[in-house]
């Protein structure tokens, strides 16, 4: 079987990336589509959700450790010829953990070095870019706000994301557009990548 494709969906909470990824999976309607996400539902991912009072560095290390385990599986899925759709990957750590939360933020270069040691570069990364003033309203209407979802913090996260997107040639999607338009843009890029092999 030929080499698969690895596609990542990034963006702040409420950007619509996760529901767009679901729509992409349905539209591709292909037995070789694998949906996955970070933090994972593996042991380290569950630990990230349950543990409290971590330092910012310890938390960052857990996200990267979860990713190291996950990447091992992702590489196998790609080698087996699958289309791997992943909700969040290394850019989440570079964007979120390098922004200041409760006065703490983690050194960007340290985060880059750690991530570079464990990741495999995706074929495509979409950044769902949106003003946090809009995304936060969406999140509040879902009633599921986490510690990562306050406005000032998300503004900094968005700035980090846009910088990384420029450096690493992510495809930036205007996520404030209607979801049909967003989906159309995303699926267009994916179909091109999948048919070009
Ligand atoms: P989720 O809502 O997409 O499941 O992600 C859970 C939260 O974890 C989200 O607010 C972003 C945050 N996060 C990080 O801060 N760093 C990371 O590396 C990842 C993967 C997620």
Image (tube, rainbow, N blue to C red):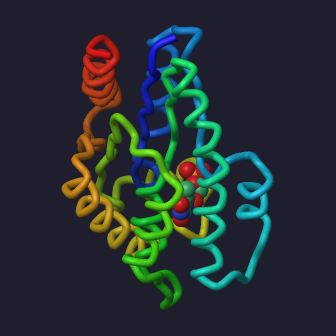
Q: Is residue 150 above or below residue 186?
A: below
Q: Is residue 56 above or below residue 176?
A: below
Q: Nearer the viewer, residue 119 or 28?
A: 119
Residue 24 position, x and y percent, is 44, 21
> For ligand 1, which image quadrant applies?
bottom right
Residue 116 position, x and y percent, is 44, 60
Tell me: 51 left or right of 115: right
- Indicate the quadrant where residue 59 lies: bottom right
Say whether residue 143 is visible.
Answer: no
Q: Residue shown at 29%/21% (left/top)?
A: 193
Q: Nearer the viewer, residue 194 or 99?
A: 194
Q: Residue shown at 58%/29% (left/top)?
A: 35
Residue 11 position, x and y percent, is 40, 51
Q: Nearer the viewer, residue 82 or 186?
A: 82
Q: Quadrant of the C terminus?
A: top left
Say whether residue 186 is visible.
Answer: yes
Tell me: 25 left or right of 164: right
């Amino acid at each position: 079987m030929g080499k698969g494709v690895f596609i990542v969906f990034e963006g702040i909470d409420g950007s619509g990336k996760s529901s767009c990824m679901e729509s992409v999976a349905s539209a591709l309607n292909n037995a070789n589509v694998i949906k996955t996400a970070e933090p994972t539902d593996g042991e380290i991912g569950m630990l990230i959700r349950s543990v409290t009072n971590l330092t910012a560095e310890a938390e960052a290390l857990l996200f990267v450790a979860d990713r190291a385990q996950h990447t091992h599986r992702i590489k196998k899925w790609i080698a087996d010829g699958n289309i791997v759709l992943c909700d969040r990957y290394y850019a989440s750590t570079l964007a979120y953990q390098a922004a200041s939360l409760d006065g703490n933020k983690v050194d960007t270069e340290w985060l880059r070095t750690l991530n570079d040691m464990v990741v495999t570069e995706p074929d495509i990364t979409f950044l769902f870019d949106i003003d946090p003033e809009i995304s936060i309203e969406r999140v509040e209407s879902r009633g599921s706000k986490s510690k990562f979802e306050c406005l000032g913090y998300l503004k900094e996260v968005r700035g980090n994301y846009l910088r990384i997107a420029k450096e690493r040639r992510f495809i930036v999607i205007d996520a404030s557009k209607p979801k049909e338009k967003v989906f159309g843009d995303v699926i267009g890029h994916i179909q091109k990548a999948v048919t070009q092999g």
